[in-house]
Image (cartoon, rainbow, N blue to C red):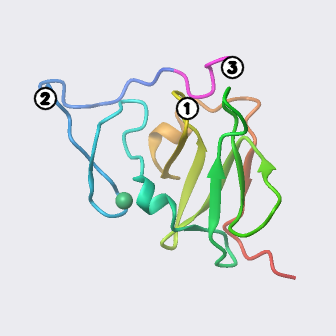
Amino acid sequence: MTGTAYGEVGFCAPGADPEPKHFCPGCGKALPFYPRYPWYFCEGCLTEAEDGDGYRLEFANVDLSGGFQWRRAGSPDWQVDGELCCLLRGRPVVVGEARMGGIVAQPIDSSAVWASPDPDRRLRDVTRRQRR
Ligand SMILES: [Zn+2]
């Protein structure tokens, strides 16, 4: 793990607030604030992620050292990718491996997603209808 995937980003957080609050952008649930992921969704919302065909998606780390994989719920096959752009309640989100382990999802227009793109970034977009 190189640790360069997201880089350090200077967010314009209100510096005077000693305990920034974070609320899930999907459901409003109160969550711990992480400067690295200022707009992340809660786990409950993440379970509602879908692809462009309306199939529920599941996400996991590849193994204990991290990595990111996803599959359609019920499918036996995991697909390993860098990050996945999918839909959460009809809105595009980017899902990937969290730096400290686990899975993190954020709105695709969050500055944190694009501020420091990894040159080797593999972002798969499944928001469009794939059904043939
Ligand atoms: Zn939520």
Q: Quadrant of residue 10?
A: top left
For disc 2, the marked residue is 17
Q: Amino acid at mark 1?
A: Gly
Q: Amino acid at mark 3?
A: Met
* Callout 1–callout 2 Cβ contact below 8 Å: no
- SS at circle 2: loop
Mark 1 or mark 2, which has the lower sequence index? 2
- SS at circle 3: loop
Tell me which secondary structure the magenta stretch mostly adopts. loop
The alpha-carbon separation of the residues under discs 3 and 2 comes to 32 Å
| Beta carbon of the mark 3 residue lies under 8 A of ligand 1 | no
The segment highlighted magenta reads 1-7
Q: Amino acid at mark 2?
A: Asp
The alpha-carbon separation of the residues under discs 1 and 3 comes to 11 Å
Mark 3 or mark 2, which has the lower sequence index? 3
For disc 1, the marked residue is 101
Residue that extends furthest to the top in the rendered view of this protein:
2
Q: Quadrant of the N terminus?
A: top right
How many C-alpha atoms fall within 10 Å of the one at disc 1: few (<14), some, or many (≥20)?
Answer: some
Q: Position of residue 131 (x, y in %)?
A: 81, 80
Q: Quadrant of the C terminus?
A: bottom right
Q: Position of residue 57 (x, y in %)?
A: 64, 64
Q: Nearer the viewer, residue 92 or 78?
A: 78
For disc 3, the marked residue is 1
Give the side of residue 52 with respect to residue 99, left or right: right
Q: Position of residue 72 (x, y in %)?
A: 72, 66
- SS at circle 1: loop
Q: Quadrant of ligand 1?
A: bottom left
Give the side of residue 68 with respect to residue 99, left or right: right
Q: Residue at x 79, y 74 (%)?
A: 130
